[in-house]
Amino acid sequence: MLKEEELKKRKWPTPKLPIKPEKLTEEQRILRGIMDEYTRDIYVREGKVILRPLGWKGIVKPIPPEECAITSLAKDSRGRIFGATSGRRSHLFVYDPDLDYVEDMGVLEENCYIKHSLVVCSDEHIIAGTRSYKSTGSPKGEIISCIIDPDDPYSLLEVSPVTTPVKGEGIAALTIDKSKNIIYGLSSESGTFFTYDVDSGEVKLYGKVDEIGDFSDVLLVYTDGCVYGGKRCGLLYKYDPDQEKIVSVAQIPSFRGRSMYNKVDSLALDEFTGIIYGGSTDGILFSFDPQSGEIICLGKPTPARRVRALTVGNDGVVYGISGDVNGVAHLFRYDPETRDLRDLGVLRATSQRWWHGYEFDAAITGLHGEIYLGESDRISHLFIYFPPIPKRKSQTQTPLPRSLEP
């Protein structure tokens, strides 16, 4: 280490650009303005982004690193957000907007991956589907029943594996038809489609959704009870519970020459209009109308591959996460009314702590229209995005009829 006397004798280089703003040339002022705008423009600047650590307001330690990647989110009728993590241990947590903190409800499984496989049966009953984390240990493919303590709604009364739908395989995706209390799922290796009756515990297998085992780990229940998912070459398929058949219904948009590599990456339903929105592994956003069978390419929100998570807001606006593994995720928005598809930018939270979000694998809309995003990195948080409230458009005042004039 240099001594203070030696540092005083050393000649330091003088900066090429003057430090004081009044000494900047016009060109230097313009360049500084461009750089200042560049450093701000990359981040989400519409609405508000906050996060909550996966622990109780600094009183309880959050879920540890490598155990806290949020890969599934679900919502109950009260508006509570439940999440499952993946890693060395899988945790179940709950966020109550009224209390505004995350509670770790407990460990579900060791070396476990729970992705797109968390469903709410009731306010006191959660179901999770597991698979092995990074192919460690014996294959996990259990349906885990989580019973919430009615006297303490933030702790688990019982956690128990109830069945293994496909022996020797994990669970790739789960979804639920609450009107029938039937869970639909996919196995992780062969892509075998199955049902699980929550009331009776009966499991039925319906074969592979794709003949060569090339499928997407995503499922969605439509308003008529049919279940939609993705298979090889970007094909959408439908399972009809009345006919108990799986049929291909449409092909999602793809770049020329890439259809054989393209698959459905995420799906979200607009329950008001009945339109299904989807994202592809090529990073393309599309819409699908099950009534007409029409698919529309809505565009590519960012240059990145993949649309890893989608959700539809209470106002019908679609929000999604674009970005590949080990990349920098961008939040984007599609407004079906104006048909505006816009990259909102990188998620940066300044409350409850200063943090940049790089990877996300889950999204869901809250009871009041807030957007919850599950960070899926080594150290992860629950991000909450509050979309801006648009200003009212000015309208020409219509004169009152004579009978209503004061």
Image (cartoon, helix red, strand yellow):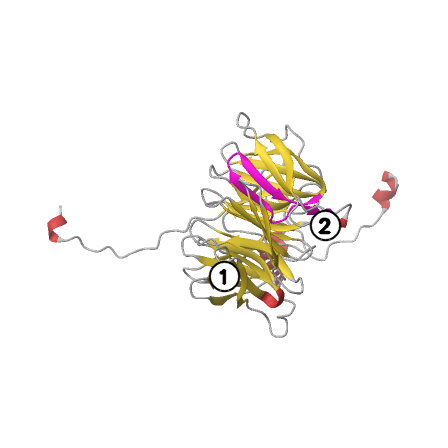
Q: How far across and down, in percent of the image, does residue 161 sit?
A: 65, 38
* Residue 7 image-quadrant placement: top right
Residue 353 seen by the camera:
no
Rendered image: mark on residue 341? 1
Residues drawn in magenta: 112-133
Q: How far across and down, in percent of the image, does residue 156 sit?
A: 60, 31
Quarter of the image that includes the C terminus: top left
Q: Earlier in the sequence, mark 2 or mark 1?
A: 2
- Residue 59 versus residue 401 in the image, above or below: above
Residue that label 2 marks: 168
Quick one: 130 or 134, which is closer to the camera? Answer: 130
- Residue 315 versus residue 89 in the image, above or below: below
* Real-space Cα separation, disc 2 to disc 1, in angstroms: 42 Å
Q: Main secondary structure of the magenta part?
A: strand
Neighbours of disc 1 within 10 Å: few (<14), some (14-19), many (20+)? some
Q: Is residue 304 magenta?
A: no
